[in-house]
Amino acid sequence: MTDDDIRNLPASVETLSLGFSNYVTDLSSLPETCPNLKNLSLNSCSGITDLSFIYRLHSLEKVTLNDIAGVSQELLDYLKSQGIEFYITEDDVVASEMIPQILDQIIEDGMTDEEKIQAIALYVSRHCKYKLFSADQSNEDPLSTTLLDGKGVCAGIAYTTNVLLRSAGINSYEAVSNSHAWNLVELDGKYYYLDAVATHNCR
C-alpha cells in the first residue's frame, strides 16, 4: 500500500490495519478520506512519523499503535479523555519521545540534507550495536528494541534509521532483501543506498 492508496480509500472504510508498510508515509488525509473510521491499527510502519491526524478522526473507537514514531503521553491522554480504547506500550512511548531528543542533539540549524543524513548515520552507528539474527531473537519491535536496548539486527537498525531520517524531513524508505535490510535515501532528487550497519563497521 502507498500514500496514493490511502487517499483513494472509500469513505465507507471503518477498519484500517497497516503492518510493515514501507511506502505509507502520510496519513494526514485519512480523516477526510475515511470519516467513518472506527478501528485503526498501525504496526511497524517506519514511514509514519506524524500522528496528528488521529485528533481529527472523530468516529474512532479503537487504536493499536506498535513501534510507531510520534506516540506521546499527550496522545495517550487525549485517547483516554475521548474514551477511545487503545493498545500502546510504555516502551513505544519512551522510544518515540527519544526521537526529537536525539535529533536536537545531532542536527544543527543550517545543516544541509546531506549533513543531516551523515549525522543520523553516524549516530546510529555509534549508539545502536549490530547483532546477528538467530532463531530465538525477536525483532518484532525494531524501534523500541534498537533505541532502548542499544542493539538490533539489520532490520531494526534500518527501521530506526528510517524513522530518524523521516523525522528530520529526509525522504527515505527501508530496503529489504532475503538476508539484509538498509535504507534508500533521497538527496537532491536522486536516491542513494545507506547502510548504517556498514557505517558501523567502518566508522
Image (spheres, grey):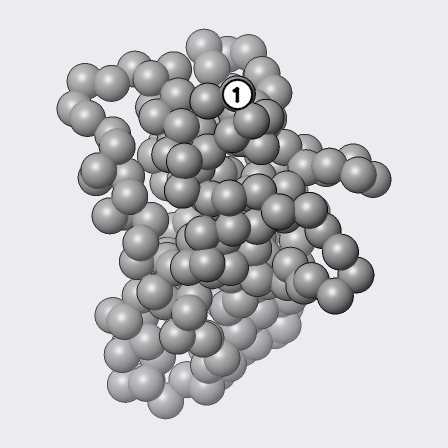
**What residue is shown with label 1?**
202
Residue shown at 45%/75% (left/top)?
A: 89
Residue shown at 79%/39% (left/top)?
A: 179
Residue at the limit of the structure toward the left, as seen here: 109
Looking at the picture, how far across and down is residue 121, in whole percent? 44, 28
* Residue 112 can be seen in this image: yes
Q: Is residue 145 above or below residue 106?
A: below
| Left or right: where 176 falls relative to 141 | right
* Residue 143 can be seen in this image: no
| Quadrant of the rendered image containing residue 9 | bottom right
Residue shown at 79%/61% (left/top)?
A: 135
Looking at the picture, how far across and down is residue 192, in whole percent? 58, 16
| Quadrant of the rendered image containing residue 80 | bottom left
Residue at the limit of the structure toward the bottom, as seen here: 83
In terms of secondary structure, where does tag 1 sit? Answer: helix
Q: Residues within 10 Å of mark 1 (few under 14, many from 20)?
A: few
Residue shown at 40%/28% (left/top)?
A: 122
Q: Is residue 132 above or below residue 62?
A: above
